[in-house]
Every structure is written in C-alpha cells, then in structure tokens.
Image: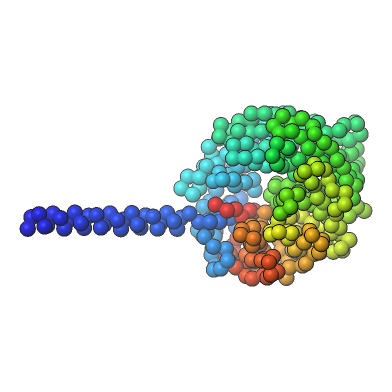
Amino acid sequence: MHIHSTSTAILKYILCLYIVVLATACTNTEKSDKFRIYFRGEDRHKEQIFTLADLSQGYVDATQQGEVLDSDICYDLYYHKGVYYDIDRPDKIKKYILKNGRPALESSCEIAQMTEIETHTWINDTVLAVIGLDSKHRNPVYAFIDTKEFKVKQYGEIPIPDDNSYQRTSIGFAAVAGDVMYITYVYHQLSADSYTTSEAINLITLDYPQMTVRHNSSNNRSTYEMKNGRHQPTMAIGADKKFYFLTNTSSGFGQMEHIPSGVLRANMKEENLDDHYFVNITDTLKGCYPTAIWHVWNDIFLLKCERTDLMSSWEDYLEERVFEYYALNVRNNSLTKLDLPLDTPWYTNNVLVDNDVAYIANNAEDGYTFWLFNPKDNSLKKGLKLDPSVKRIFSIDLN
C-alpha cells in the first residue's frame, strides 16, 4: 500500500507539472501578440505602446491597457526586430530594449559632425544608416551605427555635385540593395527673405560600404521628396524591385506649386531615375498632394494624399481631417479612391501591410478604426475599433 500511495503521489505530481507547463506555454503564446501600436492618448505628454493579436475585428481601449513610456520619449520611436530606436537628433540617438513589454534605455550614441537628421534606414540587423546634414546645414553626410555596440563605426560626406550655387540640400530616401546605396536629394537656395527649391530631383548611387560615387541622375518632371521614414514612408519597393517614391510641391513641403507632384521611379539595375515614368497626382486629382506610400501587392500601391482645398493653415495638417486614400496601379497608372472617411493627422505611419492586405488606421469623427483593404478584389471592410481616447497613432509594426 505504501508503494502504491507513493506511485500515486508521483503520478499526481507529474500531472500537475504538465498542467503548469501547458498553462505557461499557453500564456506565452498569448503574450506574443502579432502587432504593436505606438500611440498618444488624451495627454499629449504621455505616449504608449500596445500589443495585440488581431487587427481585423473587435474593440479595445488601448489607453487603459497599453504600456506608458518614459517622459523623455516624444514622437521619435522606430521599431526594428524587437528593439526601439530614438532617431530624431544626432546628439541623442538612443536604443531601447524591451523589459516586461516596456522599452528601457540600453544605450545611446552621438554623431558629432552631423547637425540635422534627414532620413535613416536599416541596412541589416547590425547596421543602422543615418543620413543628415553637415555642420553648416549644407551638404549631406552619413553615419553607419553598429546596432550591437551602438556606436558610429563609419562616417563621411556624400559627394553630391557642388557648383557653389546652393546653400542647403534635403534628402528623400536612402536604401541599400546588394552593394549599392541609393539616395535621392534636392538643392535649395537661401537668402535673407526667401527659400526656394531646385526644379529637379536627383539620385546618387554609391558603392556600399566604401561610399564611393557610382552614378548621378536627375529628373525635372517634379521635385522635392519628403523625408522617407521620418514618421511616414515616402518610398516603397515594388514587386518589380524598383523604387517608387513621392514628390510633394505643396506650400507645406516643396513650396513649388507651379510644378506637379506625384510618383517617380528609380531603377535599381540602371541606377537612375526613370525619365519615362511619372504619375502626375496634382493634375489628375486636382488639389491633392501625396504624403505617404505603401506597396500592398503586385502592381498595387496605397497612397495617402492631402486635400489642400480643405486646408487654410499649417495647423490643419495636425488637427483637421484632410487626408484621403487611393490605390495606385503602377502598371497602368490608374488611381482608385478608397471609400474611407477623411483622416487625420499627417506625418504618421498609420498603415501596415501584412499578407497582401493593408490595415489602414483611419481616424474619423468617432476615433480610430482599422480598415482592411484587399487589392486582389479591391474590397474594404471594417476591422478593429479603438476607443476614442486614442488620439494619434504614430506607427503600426509587426512584432
């Protein structure tokens, strides 16, 4: 009887242990949510992160459940492979690792010779490229940051053509494909009472990582690309492995409204701007200027556009519902307006593409609703509804 009792006790112990392990595994599965949202609620000085498993249905009050971030974090976080980065100023680039679901400062570095950051890109999991302007705010410079040791491992000037006729440059996108870096840029002229942009946009290609010049090209069909990745994407790579990027000449950006805005294309293989490709948005849509672009599936891209006819001041970018969405087919350049409520605000990465479906966080009068756009049948359906206490989504990421 003693032996039988002991065996029974051992069996019960093993069974309990199995149940505990199983419960733990289920809990861990539940915690590994697929999506993460970086947002701000009613309090403009308090930002939060919330993770969830599904954007296609349901209702959630993210402000009550989300992780509140440290007060020194303000509109600057970018998520990459389980790590958050603050890439806003060259004198305070920071790296945050997740501890119990909350970003905790791990390290920081400074790019001493850079005065202003224009754009950034992850070349791979161990190299972050930051592109900015030199100490005179005039010429573009670059820094490669080792994301493990988190220090600058390479710095230098980007040798664009210089005929001494300009006083400043601005960068659109920077990306590496294979052993080539592609960077778009424009020149600006400054005087005591004016600021003008050149009437062409340029592309320079460089050997990576040597950063020696390979080729320069120019296109005068439009000008001024907004900074890619600085809170919103203005470039996306298509299924044809070409760069599709936006130009914006409205009064809020390039300030060259006599020149049309639209979509240009850069060829990776030829390393040049395609002279034969331009989607003229402002003339086609009359008063619309593109502000963000996402590749969704095959030849279909999603555009976010500003309605200048609904705007009367700079504050309208931040406070008013002045944005609408279009599906662009780059094979035949057709534009199809999505039947969505007007959206607010600008300068946010409020769209996530997953499995050929675009999840659009649309901030209408009743707050944020995720809309699912399926380009295969051009369908739209409502997904997750957020409590109206969420006032501004900065970005949506895959975990």
In the rendered structure, the answer to whether residue 287 lies left or right of residue 95 reads right
Looking at the picture, how far across and down is residue 392, in whole percent? 64, 57
Q: Residue at x 79, y 46 (%)?
A: 267
Q: Nearer the viewer, residue 89 or 289?
A: 289
Considering only vertical position in the picture, is 346 above or below 208? Answer: below
Residue 76 in view of the camera: yes
Q: Nearer the viewer, residue 101 or 122?
A: 122
Q: Residue at x 11, y 57 (%)?
A: 4
- How many labels sit on residues? 0
- Figure colour scheme: rainbow
Q: Nearer the viewer, residue 156 or 318?
A: 156
Looking at the picture, how far across and down is residue 323, in whole percent? 75, 62
Residue 135 in view of the camera: no
Looking at the picture, how far across and down is residue 33, in whole percent? 50, 56
Looking at the picture, how far across and down is residue 364, in whole percent? 68, 67
Q: Residue at x 64, y 58 (%)?
A: 353
Considering only vertical position in the picture, is 107 above or below 55? Answer: above
Q: Quadrant of residue 298?
A: bottom right
Q: Quadrant of residue 143?
A: top right
In the rendered structure, the answer to whether residue 341 lies left or right of residue 96 reads right
In the rendered structure, the answer to whether residue 114 lies left or right of residue 356 reads right
